[in-house]
Amino acid sequence: MNKQPAIRDFSIAIVLVAVAALFAVLSPQFLGPRNLSLLLIELSITATLALGMLLVILPGHIDLSAGSGVGLLGGIAAVLVFQNQWPAPLALAAAFVAGLLIWRAMGWLIVRERIPSFIITLAGLLVFKGLFWLVIQNSTVPIVQGGGTNLYSLLTTCYLPQAAGYALATVVAVCLAWLKIASRRRRLQCGFEVESGPASFLKWLVAAQFLVLFVAVTNQFRGVPLAVLILGAVATVIHILTRHTPFGRHLYAIGGNEEAAVVSGIPVRATVIGAFTLMGAIVALTGFMQTAYAGASTTTVGELMELDAIAACVIGGVGLKGGRGSVMGVLFGALLMAVLLNGMTLLAVSPEFKFITRGLVLAVAVWMDVRLSK
Amino acid sequence: MLWWVPDCIPASPFMAPQSNPAAAVAGSAKLLEARGIVKKFPGVVALGGVSFDLRKGEIHALCGENGAGKSTLIKLLSGIHPHGTYEGSLLVNGREAAFASLQDAEKEGIAVIYQELALVDDMTVAENIFLGNEPRTRFGLIDWDRVNSAARELLDRFQLPIDPSTPVRDLGVGRKQLVEIVKALSKNSLILILDEPTAALAEAEVSVLLGILKDLRARGISCIYISHKLKEVFAVADRITILRDGVSIATSDKDSIDAAGVIRHMVGREISDLFPRRAHPPGDVVLEVRNLNVADSATGRLMLQDISFELLAGEVLGFGGLMGAGRTELLMHLFGVWGRRLGGEVRLLGQSLPADSPGTVLRAGLALVSEDRRRFGLVLEQSVGFNLSLSSLASLTRGGLIDPVAEFGRNRHFFDSLRVKSPGLDYPVGKLSGGNQQKVVIGKALMTGPRVVFLDEPTRGIDVGAKLEIYETINTLTTSGKAVVLVSSELPELMGMSDRIIMLNSGRIGGGFARAEATADRLLAAAVGQKLPPNLS
């Protein structure tokens, strides 16, 4: 739909490579298979939440409560598993439904009662943080009984067997080829210009090789992490939702011009409530992954994650006024944030400087965005 | 620093207009001159040779279709396109001018008053007039007493009955425009550039504005006046320059050219019939409104009272009235986006319509093209295709996903049949000219397959060629049995295109007329509620 973000994506890619190169030079472990595997899991968690944030920002809203929600929903599931001895799938389902209901209610308050989303979710941030600490009683609640494994803990500790990784890469590559051919045929049918056959094939070949390389690298450690598959599924669903469904078009239209959206007969309220409900689902999913990654629910789980998600969106070219942004951009933005955090942790940078760096990167990214979109 | 009244305006209160302004014009020097201007954008030549000059104390009208290059020329004259980005030369008082910015042009006394008003709604009239230019006290704080008294003085000078302490939000469009002009004059401007100043004004406000321009002319202030409304151009201009496709075609004294001549230069062809309405024998009742009473949901004030009418298939029903008569409110309410219904009934094809659900109304077969296309019509940063199909996505969806081939086909159909001039369906709609944006809004409404189409000021601020195409679209619609409600502030258009006309007066029906019995004075009499000619129905 928009041709311009290509330049922006490109500039982010350059920054990304530069940052990664810097970390690789300063710490040889950065590009080691073990660290890359951890980085991928961290990316999956950050990016999943950022993709949910995209759905909320597109129609011109914001969710500041996501970080507290991550802690709360992960904490509820942990308490149900560890203290109430619920089976993990049931506990996760219960917390998931809670997420849907709470975010739906926030969406409802925003559109029906016309309370700005900034205020509602700021209240949510505080309320959920308090509830979270009440639920886990300011203690550390493990997510699994006595050192075993369950569905909850597997979220970030499960890896695909080596052969399955390659099989999956093949399936994805075939799907990509099929989609490319179908889209090409469609564009020809509509009289659009298409890129030349060899160029198209080369692009696909590069993507396919990247997939194989990706599996090969992750197989060096334990295999493709389950968390990456979750992110892949979420990204695919949200990409289709935003690009190929009326719901997605409506999100862009509402963010671009809400009054015109109303006069165009778009169910603005239902659409915004829908976006918040989906955000609830994603906050729950992120909460489970983040809590599993930490190994237990503690008071700091999820802290400031909403800001990382918003930063990932902005770096990825999402307009905070709404109406502009794409899944690919957000994935890039999240990757930059994840690389920064991971690299700094590896270098044992003190928390003070971690905060300062994250803030500066966000400011510089937005500044570049403003400059480039002129 | 220039907080007070400019020297060029005599301090005496309102001066009588000079009896023969032409005498003042004759022989005066060229204040501003553009010679052989060529301005290129990547891939487009916006101006391909424009020569133009402005004399001291004259009103010089600039006419041309949308896209003819008027806006580009203004941006050049006002420093928005800086020196060096164009070829040719620009002279102020005979000296070569090299504006690097808007501020440079302002220093030479050039002020532009834009179509989109540049006032801050939340500030008062006085605050707006001196925004960025506030008189200071000894201590560097804003001297509010002087702000208010100087504003008062300026407004009085033009006999404008506006209180300087009124928030601009509370003013109508016409008065906002006047405040902008006063603001420009407070900066010592010698040249005013007005871009479509009357696009949103009612007839009475237009004559106030034109009166003030003539008054300024008598005081030696020059004005470049851009308008699609030839009647105004001939009422106020001394000379007329016509642009077509980026080239200045002709410059002529007002007296040596007529409206037909201007139009011929603008479009490059003869236009024989300005309102080519082809009446069509009406069919059954499609829309029925009975005893409708509607209040403003915010203030609770009764805005529409006892409105009843019927709309027949294949006819154009015109709605006229002065500003604030409730025409737009009526359409917006019937469409389900404005007001609280206190009583009455609305039936479309026998089905009762809800008062607050535009989606339902649209699906029932009623589409609205709003008067304010940028606000209510378009998502400006998105593409032409995105906007065209926005109201019709449900019918283009297969298995939950939008069918791209079906969407493209449908977009292409309306893109072609409405003759939208755009590089393609992928092009951002915000970059199109007003007339083409309007065609996109109309295309969006028509794509929903409506039985009834509401057109609220469909030709506001668009050029003659695009107007004719919109009139043709109206004819096509009624020929295929659809019914059209047309709201227009321009009486000739209302009388030229409607089969029947209803005049509104302060939220009530002031009178109804068949096409044959509608004359300008009868319509105006009904609009102000003087007498009630026999009602029609």
Image (tube, rainbow, N blue to C red):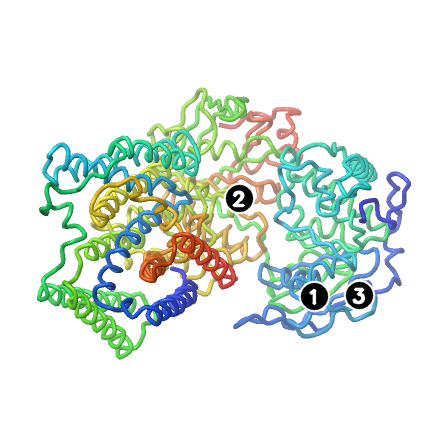
Local crowd size for mark 2, using a 10 Å CA cut-off: few (<14), some (14–19), many (≥20): some
- Left or right of residue B176, residue A119 in this image: left
Chain letter of the residue beneath label 3 in the structure image: B
Q: Are marks 1 and 2 in contact (CB under 8 Å)?
A: no
Three-letter amino acid code at the position of disc 2: Asp
Report the front residue among B334 and A326.
A326
Report the front residue among B512 and B451.
B451
- Badge nearest the viewer, 3 or 2: 3
Q: Residue at x 88, y 47 (%)?
A: B18
Q: Residue B100 carries which label?
A: 1
Local crowd size for mark 1, using a 10 Å CA cut-off: few (<14), some (14–19), many (≥20): some
Q: Which residue is drawn at 44% across and 61% down?
A: B427
Q: Which of marks 1 and 2 is nearer the N terminus?
A: 1
Residue B392 on image: x %, y %: 34, 47
Report the residue marked by disc 2.
Answer: B372
- Residue farthest to the bottom? A198
- Left or right of residue A177, residue B310 in this image: right
